[in-house]
Each structure stands twice: as C-alpha cells, then as structure tokens.
Image (tube, rainbow, N blue to C red):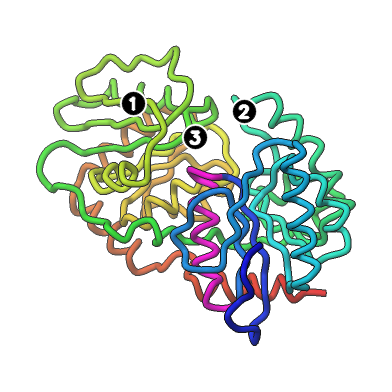
C-alpha cells in the first residue's frame, strides 16, 4: 500500500495511466509533471516514472483474480483519500469493474480519439464503439483536445465535454539540440505505422524530389508491407523506439512530417515542437489548430504527394526553417501554468 503523503494541505488528485509506453505514456508523464506543482498526486501506473510524485505501481494487463484484488485495493484507497478528482488518461477494459464506483465520484476521463483509426485492431474498435455508453452512465466530465473530437462524440456525451489544450512535451526534450546545418534536408516520419497516417503519399513525394537533397527516416512499429521503401535516401527503423532513440531521431531531423489522411490530433506535433522542429502536416482533424501554416510549419491538403513535395522544397530553405523555429520557441505551446489553471477549474466544477 502506498505511504501517506508528506503533507495534506493541498488537494489530492488520483491520476491513472495503464499505458506503459509510447504516446500515452508521454502524455501521462507530461501531464503529471505539469500538475505536481498544484496538487498532491497519487500516480497509479504500470511503468517506471520520471516524475517525482507519490506513485503506486500496479500490474494490470488483463482481467484476472490478481487484477481484481488490485482493483479492490485501489477502490478502497480512493475512498479513503477522498480526492478532489480521479483522472483517467483514456482507459482500458481492465478498469471496467471500477466504473460503478466512478459513478459516485468526481471522475475525469481524457479521450484522445472519439472514433477508431483505420488499421486499429478489432478488439479496440469494438471497445471504442461501446465505451460511450459506459461514460454516459458513470463519468461526469470528459476532456478532449479539439472541437473536432467533441463533434465526433455521440450527442448524449457532448454536454459533459471540456476542450482543453494538449499538454506540452518539454519533459522529453531536455537534451534537445539542432540538426546539422550541412547536407540534405532530414525528414522524420515517427510513430505507429497505421494506414490513416498516409505514408504512401510521403513516399510518393520523395520520388519527386532530388535524393541528394532530401532524406527520410521512417521510425516505429507497424505494418510496412506494400510500401516501396527501396531508395538510397530512405531509412527505416521498423521496431519499437526507445526514449533515447526518440531523442536522437528528433534531434537529427530538420523537419517532422505528418502526411495523415485522417486524424483527430497528434502527439507527434507536440513532440516536434518540444524539440524545436517545424512540421509539415495535412490539415485534417484538429492538427490545423496547432500547426499554423507559414508560422510554425506548413499545412497541405491530404492525399496529395505533389503538395507534400512542394512543402518539402519550401522547408529546405534554411531561412524559412529558422523563422519557424524562432516562432516555435516563442509560442510556449500549452504552458504548464495554462494547463494547471484550466484543469483545476474542471476538477472543481460541480
């Protein structure tokens, strides 16, 4: 059982994240780091944390007797502490036994997507279709990061939705450094390889460019079958990317490419900005709310290799990139202070 907090003057929030790696973990760690200055946090997670707050490591991977015992202990601890709020970073089916308890508590759920992406597993697609009903009966407040996601949710949930900016990812870019100024433009495509991310259009754009002036690194897990990757200026790292490797990849890149054909949002944008990297992205979902064309990056129409090639040519100009980088550094996207103030207001809503 976790130890008693060292002081009790501040309000307590229980924060639960059971995604042990990649984007969800990046988000959870960043949000906990931002909120730690405001409240006492009991951080329930199944991964090592780099944030110095009171933590409760758990092993919850599937419904089992052991998981049921852990959930019972967690429910008892929540009731004992009487927290201001319980905040779930998305959710997993293993947490479903807690939902009847959540109906009587101040529970906040962050939804990163309202509908499943193309290429997601069948189990996840089915769960995301049924999940809104559980939220309707058991959860008072839902956080999303764009009006696009709110509009995609069922009508019976929209009155419970609060739109909150995505947390910044500066926690992950403490060793950031600029890319080499000499040589070709280094472009990074980062993340899980799912069909909605439009990699084929980026590859077609590269076939229209001078291979001596542009290089592409494709890094992440997923299905790469069917893509034409046999080119001297294209490198693939087809596996899970560690945190150290991620930092090296973002530091080496001049620009991050997101040629998505559909999306709600993307944590990759925030990671790019944390490393002071301009972005070339398609104007889909809520991405256009963050990537501002001609200011901190370039927006192009989806499914257009010609538009992507033109944007890459434009980004190859060092003066253009420098202007974007200066703007990224000045903007302070989603400052910790803003996140804390707005999230605390949501927690305290009746």
Q: As drawn, which residue projects farthest toward the bottom?
A: 9
Quadrant holding the N terminus = bottom right
| Residue with the mark numbered 2 | 120
Kindly check if marks 1 and 2 are in contact, taking CB atoms under 8 A apart as contact.
no
Q: Where is residue 157 in the image (x, y as percent from the top left)?
A: 82, 52
Whichever of labels 3 and 1 marks the residue nearer the N terminus, that label is 1
Whichever of labels 3 and 2 marks the residue nearer the N terminus, that label is 2
Front-lying residue, 347 or 114? 347
Distance (Cα) linking label 1 and label 2: 26 Å
Distance (Cα) linking label 3 and label 1: 14 Å
Q: Label 3: how many residues lie within 10 Å, few (<14), some (14-19) or many (20+)?
A: many
Which secondary structure, mark 3? loop
On screen, residue 90 above or below 305: below
Report the mark closest to the observer, 1 or 2: 2
Which residue lies at the image location 78% right of the left edge and 35% below the top edge? 129
Which secondary structure, mark 2? loop
Whichever of labels 1 and 2 marks the residue nearer the N terminus, that label is 2
- Segment colored magenta: 20-39
On screen, residue 140 above or below 113: below
Total count of labels = 3
- Report if residue 53 lies within the magenta region: no
Front-lying residue, 124 or 199? 124
| Residue with the mark numbered 1 | 205
């Amino acid at each position: 059982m976790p130890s008693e907090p060292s002081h009790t003057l501040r309000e307590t929030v229980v924060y639960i994240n059971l995604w042990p790696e990649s984007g969800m973990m990046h988000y959870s760690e960043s949000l906990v780091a931002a909120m730690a200055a405001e409240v006492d946090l009991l951080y329930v997670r199944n991964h090592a944390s780099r944030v110095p707050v009171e933590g409760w490591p758990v092993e919850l991977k599937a419904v089992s007797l052991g998981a049921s015992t852990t959930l019972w202990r967690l429910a008892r601890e929540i009731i004992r502490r009487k927290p201001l709020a319980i905040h779930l970073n998305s959710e997993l089916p293993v947490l479903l036994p807690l939902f009847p308890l959540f109906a009587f508590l101040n529970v906040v759920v962050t939804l990163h997507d309202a509908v499943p992406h193309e290429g997601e597993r069948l189990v996840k697609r089915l769960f995301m279709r049924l999940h809104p009903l559980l939220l309707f009966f058991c959860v008072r407040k839902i956080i999303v990061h764009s009006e696009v996601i709110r509009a995609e949710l069922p009508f019976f949930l929209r009155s419970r939705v609060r739109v909150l900016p995505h947390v910044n990812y500066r926690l992950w870019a403490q060793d950031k450094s600029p890319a080499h100024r000499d040589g070709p433009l280094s472009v990074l495509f980062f993340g899980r390889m799912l069909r909605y991310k439009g990699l084929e259009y980026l590859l077609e754009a590269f076939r229209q460019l001078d291979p001596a002036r542009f290089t592409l690194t494709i890094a992440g897990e997923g299905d790469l079958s069917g893509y034409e990757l046999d080119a001297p200026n294209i490198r693939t790292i087809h596996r899970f990317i560690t945190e150290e490797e991620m930092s090296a990849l973002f530091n080496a890149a001049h620009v991050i490419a997101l040629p998505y054909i559909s999306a709600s949002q993307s944590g990759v944008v925030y990671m790019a900005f944390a490393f002071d990297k301009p972005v070339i992205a398609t104007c889909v979902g809520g991405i256009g709310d963050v990537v501002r064309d001609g200011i901190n990056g370039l927006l192009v129409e989806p499914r257009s290799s010609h538009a992507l090639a033109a944007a890459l040519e434009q980004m190859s100009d060092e003066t253009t990139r420098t202007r974007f980088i200066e703007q990224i550094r000045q903007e302070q996207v989603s400052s910790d202070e803003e996140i804390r103030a707005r999230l605390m207001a949501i927690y305290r809503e009746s």
